[in-house]
């Protein structure tokens, strides 16, 4: 399953992916002003991919799953983590709905690569998860905190990107200040199936819904990325600076 290119706002819950979400992709969506959370992933064991989304509500992610890969997102809301020991839910062979087993949610086994976090706690909650996580190339602004396990994140607690959304008829515009240095101050890995590895519980690789390997070499708009050192966040903007981007329609 792929959920892509939607504008979701002023709802109770933006996207809710309950059990058996293995193998799906959530990409290039704009979510904001949602009362609950932009994305709720409930009792899934992975692998699944969440990339190039703008998650701008007060709560961006309610994560009661494991084995998710989050890459090149702009996340301006809090991340809420919960384990789930009382329910055992299915995991599967790759690209199948056959049940390989049942197990509860310990939490962790997630991947976060090349995201931009604005405010709230960032990924600090991952310091307490049960299963190791994998993180690199993330940017943390306005007090958003990196996890202890990430090596050399870009952390700028006083940097205000002046994030603002403006509607103009059917269009939605994003104003945001990027920094050229985010693309050069640290290495950002190109996100691929090889980089993501295998989700721990099912033991299967991260692939696209049709079985093709993942290679995130284009940005939110479909522009080519620098394969050697892609710029963090949804947009390939190596020049940085103050930007006014029409993000909807894409």
Image (spheres, rainbow, N blue to C red):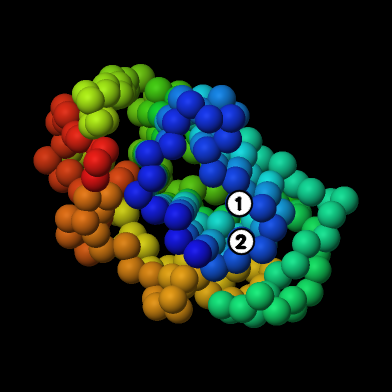
State the image quarter where residue 168 is shown. top left
Crowd rating for badge 2 (residues with CA inside 10 Å; few <14, some 14–19, many 20+): many
Of the 4 image quadrants, the one containing the C terminus is top left
**Residue at 56% across, 77% down:** 95
**Residue at 27% across, 22% down:** 166
Which residue is tagged 2?
21
Residue 80 in view (yes/no): yes
Q: Position of residue 51 (x, y in %)?
A: 40, 53
> Vertically, is 38 above or below 227?
above
Q: Position of residue 127 (x, y in %)?
A: 63, 42
Secondary element at tag 1: strand
Which residue is tagged 1?
17
- Residue contact between numbered discs 1 and 2, judged by CB atoms under 8 Å: yes
Secondary element at tag 2: loop
Q: Position of residue 179 (x, y in %)?
A: 21, 34
State the image quarter where residue 131 is shown. bottom right
Residue found at the very far left of the displayed protein: 239
**Residue at 20% across, 35% down:** 246
Residue 148 in view (yes/no): no
Q: CA distance from mark 1 to mark 2?
A: 6 Å
Query: 59 left or right of 140?
Result: right
């Amino acid at each position: 399953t792929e959920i892509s290119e939607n504008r979701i706002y002023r709802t109770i819950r933006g996207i809710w992916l309950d059990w058996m979400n293995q193998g799906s992709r959530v990409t290039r969506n704009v979510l904001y002003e949602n009362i609950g959370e932009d994305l709720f992933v409930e009792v899934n064991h992975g692998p699944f991919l969440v990339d190039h989304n703008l998650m701008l509500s007060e709560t961006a992610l309610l994560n009661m799953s494991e084995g998710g890969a989050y890459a090149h997102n702009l996340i301006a809301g809090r991340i809420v983590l919960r384990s789930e020991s009382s329910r055992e839910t299915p995991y599967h062979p790759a690209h199948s709905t056959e049940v390989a087993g049942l197990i509860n949610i310990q939490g962790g086994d997630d991947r976060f690569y090349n995201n931009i976090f604005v405010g709230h706690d960032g990924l600090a909650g991952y310091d307490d998860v049960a299963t190791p996580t994998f993180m690199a190339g993330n940017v943390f602004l306005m007090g958003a905190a990196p996890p202890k396990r990430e090596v050399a994140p870009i952390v700028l607690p006083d940097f205000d990107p002046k994030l603002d959304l403006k509607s103009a008829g059917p269009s939605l515009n994003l104003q945001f200040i990027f920094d050229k240095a985010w693309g050069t101050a640290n290495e950002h890995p190109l996100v691929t199936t090889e980089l993501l590895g295998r989700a721990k519980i099912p033991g299967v690789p991260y692939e696209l819904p049709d079985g093709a390997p993942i290679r995130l070499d284009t940005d939110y708009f479909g522009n080519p990325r620098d394969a050697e050192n892609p710029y963090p966040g949804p947009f390939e903007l190596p020049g940085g600076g103050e930007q006014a981007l029409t993000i909807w329609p894409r």
